Image: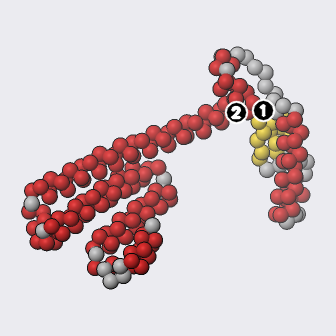
Amino acid sequence: GPLFYTVVELVTAPDEFFSMPFHYAYWGFALSIGIIQKLRLMSGEERQDLLILLENVIRSSILAVMYWFVEMLTEPKYADPHLFFTNQSHVFMLSALLFISIIVGLDDARAQRFLYILRDTTEQLQTFSNWLFGRDMLSIALTDPASLSLVRRERTVIFMDIRGFTGWSEQQEPEVVVKMLNRYYEIAESVLYSSNAIMLKYTADEVMAFF
């Protein structure tokens, strides 16, 4: 975004671009927000609240800086930050923007936190549902809530592994072992799922199937 904007501005008005302070402000804000969003992707949930709050403060600061630039255009004396902040209306506007940005940031962080909780809960419920009902039964339960009533069901568990796998794998190249296991899993899935298995679980050469 900043690069495209800069190229267009340099083509249309190359002599004026670097004399306009709001161009530098645009670059600064765009890069700051981009860095914060990158940090949000890299950091865990425990730091998300602080980063979200910081991003909202920076976004609100865009209005504050633009307000300062407009005031400088009408009253050049306000180019001096000290004189700018001696005006009570300026202090009020900036304080209001800061307050609003904090409120919006806290609300956004709270919404994101609930979103993480909802996502984790949904994943857990889907896992539990798959284990309890099986993939087909889960879709049936969504369309027919009565199928969720508590009933006693019979389940069968089968364990199977490859005889002599450990000794054989120690003598082979890793690529050979991986290729063999992939083929083994493919055969197990085709046979067990066609036999109405609810779920399969793999641990190296061991396959655990639920019926």
**Which residue is identified by label 1?**
198
Could you tell me which secondary element the residue under label 1 belongs to?
loop
Q: Nearer the viewer, residue 136 or 29?
A: 29
* Residue farthest along the bottom direction in this orientation: 15
Residue depicted at 34% across the width and 54% down the height: 56
Residue 167 appears in the figure: no
Q: Is residue 55 left or right of residue 94?
A: right
Viewport quadrant of the C terminus: top right
Which image quadrant for residue 103? top left
Residue placed at 27% from the left, 58% from the top?
63
Q: Position of residue 102 (x, y in %)?
A: 29, 49
Left or right of residue 113: residue 77: left
Q: Residues within 10 Å of mark 1 (few under 14, many from 20)?
A: many
Tell me the quadrant of the picture where the N terminus can be found: bottom left
* Mark closer to the chain start, 1 or 2: 2
Farthest residue to the front: give it: 12
Binning the other alpha carbons within 10 Å of mark 2 as few (below 14), some (14 to 19) or many (20 upward) gives some
Q: Give 56 or 121, whichever is nearer the viewer.
A: 56
Q: Which residue type carries mark 2?
A: Asn
User: What kind of element bears circle 2?
Assistant: helix
| Residue on which disc 2 sits | 130
